[in-house]
Amino acid sequence: MSKRSSNEFRQNATNRRGIVIDRDPKKMKIKVRFEDEDDVVTHWIDVTGPSSNGVKFFSMPGLEDEVWCAMDAKGEAGCLLGSRYNEKDAPPHQTNEDIAVQFPGGFIHLNTGSGAIAIKTPGSVAIEAGGDIDLKSGRLLHNGKNVGHDHKHGGVVEGAANTAIPV
């Protein structure tokens, strides 16, 4: 039995690097294996985020992610500080201007230098607005064809007839 008081353990927290081996998204908890401590596995520890009140952000680390954890000195309680990029798992972009979310089959990419935003998804996209949606752009393209306010149609005949596809 240790001669240290429980308060002393709370004051001597440590940062540890480990591997995520289990996840519980409903409770926002993970289990981490510390390879440098003979593969010791944590109890369930908290997953933190940049914000949890007002504007919320949710993202669980992946299984086998290399992560940094803040642990109490006993190693019994702690929280995830974040995942760590490494040679196996490199970041999706390598400039100071890039903000990205990458997932299997898709991504959301914002370049703060140019202001460009790119979105690719294998699923559907839903936009819900409580008010108007106001699109302002140079051109509005669909499959490479201009469908914006200034598009033109071929074969237009005055009257009730349908027009040809946009050109």
Image: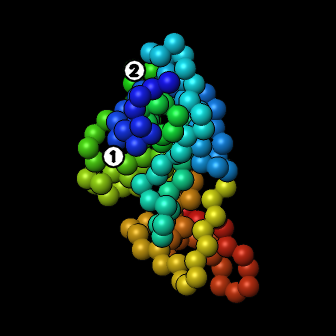
Q: Secondary structure at mark 1?
A: strand
Q: 57 above or below 22? A: below
Q: Residue at x 58, y 82 (%)?
A: 130
Please state if 113 lies on the left or on the right of 26 as rendered.
left
Q: Secondary structure at mark 2?
A: loop
Q: 97 above or below 34? A: below
Q: How is the image coloured?
A: rainbow
Q: 50 above or below 5? A: below
Whether label 2 touches label 1, CB < 8 Å? no
Q: CA distance from mark 2 to mark 1?
A: 19 Å
Q: Amino acid at mark 1?
A: Asp
- Label 2 neighbour load within 10 Å: few <14, some 14-19, many 20+: few
Mark carried by residue 23? none
Q: Residue at x 49, y 61 (%)?
A: 52
Q: Which residue is mark 1?
A: 98
Q: Which residue is mark 2?
A: 87
How far across and down, in percent of the image, does residue 77 sit? 51, 39
How far across and down, in percent of the image, does residue 124 sit? 67, 55
How far across and down, in percent of the image, does residue 27 sit? 64, 49
Q: Amino acid at mark 2?
A: Glu
Furthest residue in direction top, as rendered: 38
Q: Nearer the viewer, mark 2 or mark 1?
A: 2
Look at the image and tell me in which quarter the C terminus lies: bottom right
Q: Earlier in the sequence, mark 2 or mark 1?
A: 2
Q: Residue at x 54, y 16 (%)?
A: 39
Q: Nearer the viewer, residue 43 or 164?
A: 43
Q: Residue at x 33, y 46 (%)?
A: 98
Q: Nearer the viewer, residue 14 or 117?
A: 14
* Residue 10 visible in the current orientation: no
- Give the quadrant of residue 12: top left
* Residue 12 visible in the current orientation: yes
